[in-house]
Image (spheres, rainbow, N blue to C red):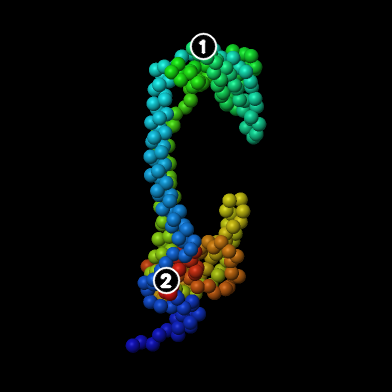
Amino acid sequence: MTAADPRHISTAATLPPELRGTVPRDVQLTALGKTVAAIAVATAAGAFVAAIWMSIVYLRIDAERHLRDRESVSDTAEVVEVALRRGEHPRRVVTYRYESSGHSYTGQVVLREKDRRDVSRGMPIAIEYLPSRPEASWLAGDRPSGLPIVLIPLTALGLLAVGAMIARTLRRQWILLSEGRAALASVTGFKKVHREHKYKAYRVSYEFQTLSGARQRSRCEIGKAPPPIGTMVPIVYHRDRPTWSATYPLAFVQPFRRR
């Protein structure tokens, strides 16, 4: 049996006990990891629910569009009120009244911000409506738009992509802690990272020595105040790709704790 490298013995002596054993290590999700995993599952499930729900809505809107194409009639209504919806993008809300089969009905429409047509109380305004459902009306030439069918796969794929990204992050941390080698790294620098208009994270740069003796530089993001430059911190790195590493402890996984 060959003698152990004293350098590695001293390094192992300062590593957390749970990182000194053999690999693969038994790993489990942290409380945060379980929450994130649940979000990934919910997001993936939401993709299928959204696709089904949006398909139903699309079919209903499409059927309504065909009904308007077949049955809509033109008429003239009287404007009874013009209100201004204030805000960053003010828009006019027009309320009008019209007659159909001896009954009076009221409709309302929100004009586009760039719509400059002259509309005031008491003025006539051209509308269209459905004789079979006279309460359903709209301004002439401005039929309600439908749901673009392309939004259905885009929404579903977008949700699936988010779930896949979360699952990939969990898997990478799981593999890294389970199969990665442990080492001590020297912090060489850090800087704040801008997140959602605030500095919420730090990108920490560090340097460590692999089992083969090669020096490796890497970096990762942490959500807490970074350690001072020159501080020795425990890390785990992938045995085949040392550039893939992370400071320990990891956010989403931890060594399995037997009770």
Q: Give how far apart the Cα atoms at labels 1 and 2 are.
A: 77 Å
Is 100 left or right of 25, judged from the image as shown? Answer: right
The residue positioned 44% from the left and 64% from the top of the image is 29
| Residue 89 falls in image quadrant | top right
The residue sitting at 41% across, 56% down in the picture is 167
Report the disc number at residue 256. 2
Please give the residue where the numbered disc 1 appears in the rendered image: 102
Residue 135 drawn at (x, y percent): 50, 21
Q: Earlier in the sequence, mark 1 or mark 2?
A: 1
Residue 173 location, quadrant: bottom left
Query: For the view shown, which residue lies furthest in the front direction?
Result: 102
Q: Residue at 41% of width from left, 78% of height from top?
A: 21
**So how many labels did they put on this image?**
2
Q: Nearer the viewer, residue 75 or 181?
A: 75
Compared to residue 62, the image places residue 243 above or below, namely: below
Question: Which numbered disc covers residue 185?
Answer: none
Q: Work out whether residue 211 can be spotted.
A: yes
